[in-house]
Image (tube, rainbow, N blue to C red):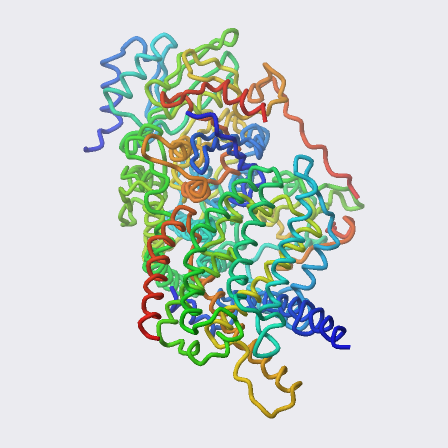
Amino acid sequence: MFGEVSRHLLRKRATILYPFKERELVPLPKGYRGKISFNRDLCVGCTLCAKDCPSNACEITKDERGNRPVFHLDRCCFCGQCEETCPRRAITLTTEFELAAYDRSALVVR
Amino acid sequence: MAFSTFEVPVGPQHPALKEPENFTFTVDGEHVVGVKLRIGYNHRGIEKAAESRTYIQNLYLMERICGICSVAHTTTYAQNVEYALGKEIPRRAEYYRVIIYELNRIHSHLLWLGVAGHEIGFDTLFMYVWRDRERVMDILEMLTGNRVTYAINTIGGVRRDITPEMADKVRKSMDLVEQRVTYYKKAAAAEPTLLTRVKGVGILRTEDARRLCAVGPTTRASGVKFDVRAEDPYAAYDEVPFNLVSYDLCDVLSRILVRVDETLESARIVKYCLDHMPSGPVRVKLPRTVPPGESVSRTEAPRGEVIHYLRANGTDKPERYKVRSPTLGNLPSVCEMLTSKGDYVVRIADIPIALASIDPCFSCTDRAAHFVDPSRGKEWSWTFEQIRKYARKD
Amino acid sequence: MSKPTEQAILDELRTQFQQELLEAKVTRDRRIFIEVSPRAYKPVMDYIVRTMGFTHLSTMTGLDSTEGFEIMPHLSRGGAVLTVKVRVARDNPMVETITDLIPGATLYEREIHDLVGVVFRGHPNLERLILYEGWPEGVHPLRKEYKAVQPEPLRRV
Amino acid sequence: MSVFLDILSILLFPGFAFVIVLALIYEWIDRKFYAKLQNRMGPTYTGPAGVLQPFADLIKLLAKEDITPMAADRPFFSITPVVALALMLTGVLIIPIGGASGLLSFHGDVIVAVALMTLLAIVLFLSGLFSVNRFSIIGAERAVLQLLGYEIPLMLAVLGVALGAGSLTLAEIAGSTKAWYLFGPQVIGFAIYIVAAQAELERVPFDIPEAEQEIVAGWQTEYSGRKLALFRLTRDVELVYISGLAAALFLGGAGPVLEGIHPWMQTLLSTLLFVVKTVIILLILSTIRALFARLRIDQMVDFSWKYLVPISLLQMVLVRLVI
């Protein structure tokens, strides 16, 4: 064990200074399921996304063109089921994962 | 049985296992003479919740039964619904499920190896193992979009496909994992202080393992050759050649060896699947409602056999969904291990490592049960009431 | 030992217990479902565990169907899963325990006793299991009439 | 005037203030080196490269609430941390830091040095006993059991050196050329001393009395706030004290005294030499900490009586032959 331990004296550290420096070292693959982005004009108001959402984070509201979903990120479990069920590809999950906010209204995606 | 014993609660919030469980050990000096186990702190009523959700939504409920082996429960659940529908899923999807399952087994076993090192004060091993585990977590994040809750299984196949360059990255990581794990097996297993802490500790004899229906590495470390992948092959396991790892030393060391060998075995399986993965679609559209009927589905999670039972009534919600996670099957065995009997003596210092040796995941178990001290044995001069009366005294 | 096909297992059970075997079906390979009357439950289990060698009890499912309760131990040997179903009347839910045959069953029977409310005659210590001390007596969450409290939706902003 | 100077030297330079600051810096070195061995960073954000982290911990603990459990033996519960720190700080006065001899130098101070270590272990046992808590009692019991294990080899190792140098005062042992031949039988003595020191400091593989996984924090479980701060400070000062003692016994204390240079320069030089030697010993202790898993208490006592004691006796015989 001593050999392995002493070899580490020369090796570069494995941990990164994430929040303050070295943000680019965070491995973020293309298909990462992060914050929801919703394209309002593609949506036809079929409310399938609200039916399939396991943590009912997707609420249906009315607006002039019919039903439109509203996504509450503080309830969402980022499973990506809405992205899959949406027939019009209006919902996509971006790779943004830093979702801390001071008040809950910031966590709503219209 | 002198009355000089007192009870040491290894409580719900305990540094040994960051899991919500309570063991009350009756201790005579340094020797543990009894264990009373109380779980249920994290019981979330998943089975009742499953009855009020659609089959699609249940996928994500099943995934959150266990934080470490989440793919085990979703694969078992997806298969269960596919059995009930009587539909076959594309071969490529089955191979992809095996790949993700084995990657999850590697990450779960490495996580356990690190925690086992931490339990016996070997923090360097903990740091190294968890650093190497990051390779596997990054691969899983690349393949499925998230480090832990993969959401890769769906009813009728898998939701993403693997591209050739992803496959190369996976192969490279598997070589690294194999190289590192063989090092750990050679160096760590030869480390005298580690050996003294795990050899001859937490004995579970073969007939006890059979009698108490132990599952997974715990029972395979006691010489019982029981592995769902070999006996009851599901997904693509009927075509994937792998040898069943089992040791018969019956102690914590043999559980370490079983898990380390299984990690190497899993790396080989992943590489085999990557090479022999047939092309074609990865999922097939299945109806949202399941005709009335029942079905049982089993898989081999990193901790042992997971069994699900589904009773469908023709609607899009299951009528009853029973889940039994592996740790529940191993709990009677851990109580057996932790009770000193005759010349086999258990000390307080052995509790964390014996407890950790079955790799308990109480978040899964809490969906189910707690077990009372096996004081039904004759070597006990106390009845249960005495313990309770005694416990209330101090 | 070669894996006897599901049919062979079924035939052996049929020869042993013709009239008690109310229903027997093989849904897919290595999955056998049989239903026995409460009277024949213990002898059938005894035969299955002791003579046929189904020593591994994976789990036991407790179910509240409309006309009564159903208890289903799932046993396995050599990969084949045999599920034995027994119906129990709703007014006095009572069935013999199988912990003397398989010690591993103490755990599962206690869970069913807690969640579905079936009493297992002869169980060593049939005490409260999953539910915490303060849970009211006689209320069994997995029964159909027990309505789970739905978490009320978050305060919509 | 000289009295004022003495008080000053006790309180300030080679005395308490300097040692406490040194102790906290040693804790930083230990944590940083230990992290480096484990391929991670260690403290980095407080102060340059995290140097102020031990100070920050100390100040935080001092500000935290200080709870005394109802069942605990109140007066003794709060005295033991103070006594423990006092023991260590008096011990430091004997160690030669600023010059050839420590502030206090009298015939037989080697015995006092070792006795202080044993006394500290007893005080830690009492503190575990007074905080009436299951985990503390087990921790206290283990502390004493461990004391039985490492105390004899420790004393024999120290005695071996004293025998070699032919005197019982640290100053003479440090100064005598005979004590210098580390490459003779003293190597065994040094090794035994290091292992026993690791046990005295309750560090892995001998941190059995405060095994975090089994008994939460052993005898420290009930302590919080100021009392815990005092205990942690004692632990750090003990680090300086033990490595200082090792430097004095085995590596020739505060180094060769050069005549003719200005006395201030001399103190500076010997302090520098003292720091260099103690840091080397500290790094050895940290490497040991990174290499091993924690032993069980019965294994530890077995280990010390089966290996440490016979080897230290052998070392005594060898020293006798060599002189």
Q: Nearer the viewer, residue C144 or D310?
A: D310
Q: Position of residue B148 (x, y in %)?
A: 52, 50
Vertical order, B126 against B216 (above or below): below
**Residue ID at (29%, 21%):** C49
Q: Nearer the viewer, residue B23 or C140?
A: B23
Q: Nearer the viewer, residue A28 or B8?
A: B8
Residue B188 as seen in the image, left or right of residue D106? left
Q: Position of residue C3 (x, y in %)?
A: 22, 32
Residue D37 as seen in the image, left or right of residue D48? left
Q: Residue furthest front?
A: D107
Question: From where the camera sits, is residue B281 visible?
Answer: no
Quadrant in the rendering for residue D164: bottom left
State the quadrant of the C terminus of chain C.
Answer: top right
State the quadrant of the N terminus of chain C.
Answer: top left
Quadrant in the rendering for residue C72: top left
Q: Position of residue A11 (x, y in %)?
A: 47, 73
Residue D76 as seen in the image, left or right of residue C40? right
**Residue ID at (27%, 39%):** B223
**Residue ID at (31%, 42%):** B221
Q: Position of residue B232 (x, y in %)?
A: 31, 37
Question: From where the camera sits, is residue B313 visible?
Answer: yes
Q: Residue furthest bottom?
A: D260
**Residue ID at (53%, 43%):** D215
Vertical order, D21 against D226 (above or below): below
Q: Nearer the viewer, residue D27 or D85?
A: D85
Number of numbered tags placed on the structure image? 0
